[in-house]
Every structure is written in C-alpha cells, then in structure tokens.
Amino acid sequence: PEVINGRTHKATVVDLSPWVEYEFRVVASNSVGIGEPSRPSALLKTKAAVPVVAPTNISGGGGSRSELVITWEPVSEELQNGEGFGYIVMFRPLGSASWTKAAVASVESSKYVYRNESITPLSPFEVKVGVYNNEGEGTLSSISIVYSGEDEPQMAPAGASALSVSAAAVEVSWLPIPWNRLTGRVLGYEVRGW
C-alpha cells in the first residue's frame, strides 16, 4: 500500500473485490523503521456488484437421445460478487439466429440438460454460459460447439462367426457397424452365447 503523510488520519482503500469481508490494520513508520500494527478493525463487507467473470471450460455432449448436455467449470465464491448467484445458459442449433435461454439458480451447478424430442442425434449447437446475481446479469463465455446425445445403434453387426480354439474357448468375430451420422459411434459390443 502507498505511504500516507503523517498528518493524514484517513485513507481510501481501492481495488477491493465486491462482496468480500475485509479487516484493516494501520502501521506507523518513520526514518528509524516500522512500528507494530494496530489491532484489526471490525470486519467490513464491500458492496455487491454484477459478476464479471464468466464460467470456463464450456463443453458437454453425451446424454440420451433428444438431450443436449452442457457443462462448465463453476465460478468460485470470491468471484460471485453478491447474493442470488446463478448461471445463464444460452444455446442454439448451429446456423440458427435465435438463442434459447435458461437460468440455473444453484451456485454449485456445473451442468444443464435440455430435453426436446425434436433434437436429432449428434446435432451441433452453439453454447455460451454466463453469470448473474441480485445486482444483474454479468459476463457470458465465448461460444463453444456442443453435440446433442447419440441414438442407440439401429442395426445388428453382420457376419458373426465362431471358431472353436480349445476345449473351453471359442473365438467369435463379426463385421463392425459403420459410423452413422444420425446414431453416432459404436462404443462396444455385447457377445451372448447359449
């Protein structure tokens, strides 16, 4: 902190964070050195302000058919700047002009799931997440691309065959299911025997 003239008995402390409790001490100094600090002042909370830090790591995807899952890194308490803190989630299909907007009132939230039967599997959406508190709406993140949920595979694997390799083992093989824009990637197969 800046050194204040010895005849001055008050100072304005600047660049403090909004809605944070502070306590202060005063230290006297002269050419010989610095004395002991005063006892701490009473705790004083600065006034609330509109939040200015947007959530980071906007991503998502996955989920079930007809779902858009959006995730983000929550904003820490010291950057919420006031009571009534929450998140604003905005999204639109890639190429669309109008945004859909939703409020998530929980401070700890890091996920929003939008469900709508009209969403086709693996559709790209433009997504941004912002913040708000009782003082108003704050900053929005930059736009991220998030894909809606996939659908279950619509066909069975073809060409299944089995080859006996020992008295206790059989090797089973099949042709992979090709990637499909509407249903997505195959993450695994289940082999059943009877």
Image (spheres, helix red, strand yellow):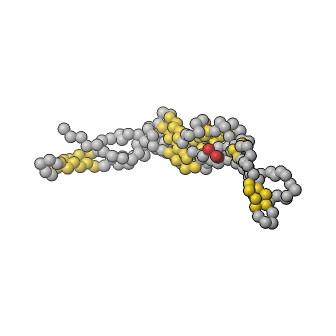
Position of 68 with respect to 9 (left or right) is: left
Quarter the C terminus occupies: top left
In-image side of 22 versus 93 (left or right): right
State the quadrant of the N terminus: bottom right
Residue 121 is at least partly visible in this image = no
**Horizontal and vertical percent for residue 18?**
71, 45
Which residue sits at x=56%, y=40%? Answer: 108
Locate residue 78, reporting x and y percent: 64, 46
- Which residue lies at the image location 52% right of the left edge and 47% below the top edge? 59
The residue at the point 12 percent across, 48 percent down is: 167
Residue 175 at what x, y percent from top left? 28, 49
- Point out the residue furthest to the bottom here: 31
Which residue is at a point 50% across and 34% down the rendered structure image? 116
In the figure, 90 relative to 31: above or below?
above
Q: Up-down: is 141 above or below 5?
A: above
Q: Position of residue 117 (x, y in %)?
A: 48, 33
